[in-house]
Image (spheres, rainbow, N blue to C red):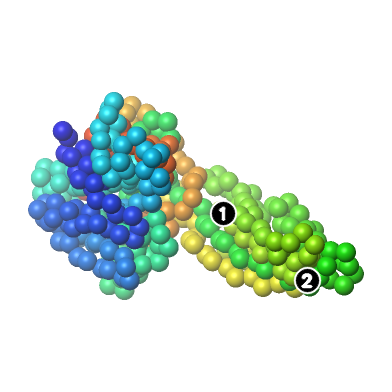
């Protein structure tokens, strides 16, 4: 059994459903301490956070990941119990196999190898782990990055282990992510009987023209790395449950995945102006999950591309697709950020899995990236 597979199995059998860590970070901290890392615990609320560092100098390369997983769902949908790691037909099955305990195992093995083969490597290597990535993401990476900033700790390179590959290991890696802005909008009307519309004000009817304009608006045109900003209605609800009542209010949830070509503040201002122009009575509460970030080149991108090519024979495609990741919290620091991990085709699904051969290859790619950036 390979070292990466063995550790991945140990991690999967710990049911670390967010925000629980279930001992995953303790296990990793012990492995890293044996390799010369200094572990530090930075908990917040119910969340377990680990910062482990080897070395004191720059450049500082940080591996960023999470030990928490999403709930398994009905166990009857699984071929094997979700927290019982099973290897079958060349795949490791279990909740978190791809998102992202397989990546964590591969990186630990890579870090151990760097310490063994290059004990006097340049700069520093760090591991930042949280148990809050799949949850609200308030007390995890955000908290640790703020703490590091207060100390004056500057991260130069951040390698995130999120599953980025699409059809084959290393065929794509993330060099950025779009921002995410959610608006909880309430349109107010006046409740009444459907037979007497003149005595009521239907908020659904009032909002319809504004909704049409919202979904037809071009917010920006994106850029070479990012698609244009997209607005989607995530939920819309109104009514009392009776078929003869005009509702008094309509609730709408809007989400914008936006590119660096626009700011969250500009989007909020435009949407507010649109609602005012339509003469609506409304309230609007915003939740900004994260700003966009992009690494449009640099030493980390080059090292990852070269490491993937050396192991797989192909150059990965640079991507900014997908949802948010904890890389957004590191994005504001100015660090170069790349996300590289296994295939994402089974993440959050029943029978989540990762190819055993991909685990071993990923550990090799991570090590080669570290070697290219930090080996003397």
How many residues crowd around disc 1 within 10 Å: few (fewer than 14), some, or many (20 or more)?
Answer: many
Which residue has dot 2 on it? 191
Q: Nearer the viewer, residue 340 or 245?
A: 245
**Image position of 314 (left or right of 245):** left
Q: Is residue 232 visible?
A: yes
Residue 284, position as x, y percentages in the image: 64, 70
Using the image, determine if residue 230 lies above or below residue 8.
below
Q: Earlier in the sequence, mark 1 or mark 2?
A: 2
- Judged from the image, the secondary structure of the residue bearing numbered disc 2 is loop
How many residues crowd around disc 2 within 10 Å: few (fewer than 14), some, or many (20 or more)?
Answer: some
Which residue has dot 1 on it? 257
Q: Nearer the viewer, residue 369 or 193?
A: 193
Residue 355, position as x, y percentages in the image: 30, 32
The quarter of the displayed image where residue 369 is located = top left
- Residue shown at 78%/71% (left/top)? 191
- Residue shown at 52%/65% (left/top)? 288
Residue 287, position as x, y percentages in the image: 54, 66
- Residue shown at 37%/47% (left/top)? 72
Q: Is residue 263 visible?
A: no
Using the image, determine if residue 371 lies above or below residue 47.
above
**Image position of 134 (left or right of 375):** right
The quarter of the displayed image where residue 258 is located = bottom right
- Residue shown at 31%/65% (left/top)? 47
Residue 11, position as x, y percentages in the image: 23, 48
Using the image, determine if residue 365 lies above or below residue 131.
above
The quarter of the displayed image where residue 80 is located = top left
Q: Nearer the viewer, mark 1 or mark 2?
A: 2
* Residue 106 image label: none
The Cα–Cα distance between marks 1 and 2, rounded to whole angstroms, is 34 Å
């Amino acid at each position: 059994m390979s070292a990466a597979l063995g550790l991945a199995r140990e991690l999967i059998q710990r049911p670390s459903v967010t925000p629980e860590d279930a001992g995953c970070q303790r296990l990793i901290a012990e492995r890293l301490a044996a390799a010369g890392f200094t572990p530090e615990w930075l908990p917040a609320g119910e969340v377990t956070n680990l910062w482990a560092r080897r070395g004191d100098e720059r450049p500082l390369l940080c591996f960023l990941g999470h030990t928490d997983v999403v709930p398994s769902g009905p166990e009857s949908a699984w071929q094997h119990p979700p927290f019982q790691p099973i290897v079958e037909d060349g795949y490791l099955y279990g909740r978190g196999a791809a998102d992202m305990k397989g990546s964590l195992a591969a990186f630990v093995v890579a870090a151990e190898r760097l310490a063994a083969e290059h004990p006097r490597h340049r700069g520093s290597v760090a591991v930042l782990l949280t148990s809050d990535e799949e949850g609200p993401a308030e007390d995890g990476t955000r908290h640790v990055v703020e703490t590091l900033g207060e100390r004056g700790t500057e991260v130069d390179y951040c390698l995130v282990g999120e599953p980025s590959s699409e059809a084959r290991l290393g065929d794509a890696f993330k060099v950025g992510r779009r921002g995410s802005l959610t608006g909880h909008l309430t349109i107010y009307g006046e409740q009444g009987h459907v037979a007497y519309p003149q005595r009521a004000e239907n908020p659904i009817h009032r909002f319809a023209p504004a909704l049409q304009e919202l979904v037809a608006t071009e917010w920006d045109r994106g850029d070479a790395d990012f698609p244009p900003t997209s607005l989607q209605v995530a939920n819309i609800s109104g009514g009392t449950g009776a078929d003869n009542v005009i509702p008094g209010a309509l609730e709408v949830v809007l989400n914008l995945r936006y590119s660096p070509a626009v700011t969250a503040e500009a989007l909020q201002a435009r949407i507010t102006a649109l609602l005012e122009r339509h003469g609506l009575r409304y309230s609007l509460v915003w939740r900004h999950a994260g700003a966009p970030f992009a690494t449009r080149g640099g030493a980390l991108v080059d090292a990852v591309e070269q490491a993937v090519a050396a192991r797989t024979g192909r150059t990965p495609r640079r991507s900014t697709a997908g949802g948010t990741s904890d890389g957004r919290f590191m994005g504001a620091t100015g660090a170069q950020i790349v996300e590289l991990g296994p295939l994402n085709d089974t993440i959050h699904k029943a029978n989540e899995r990762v190819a055993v051969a991909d685990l071993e290859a990923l550990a090799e790619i991570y090590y080669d990236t570290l070697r290219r950036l930090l080996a003397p």
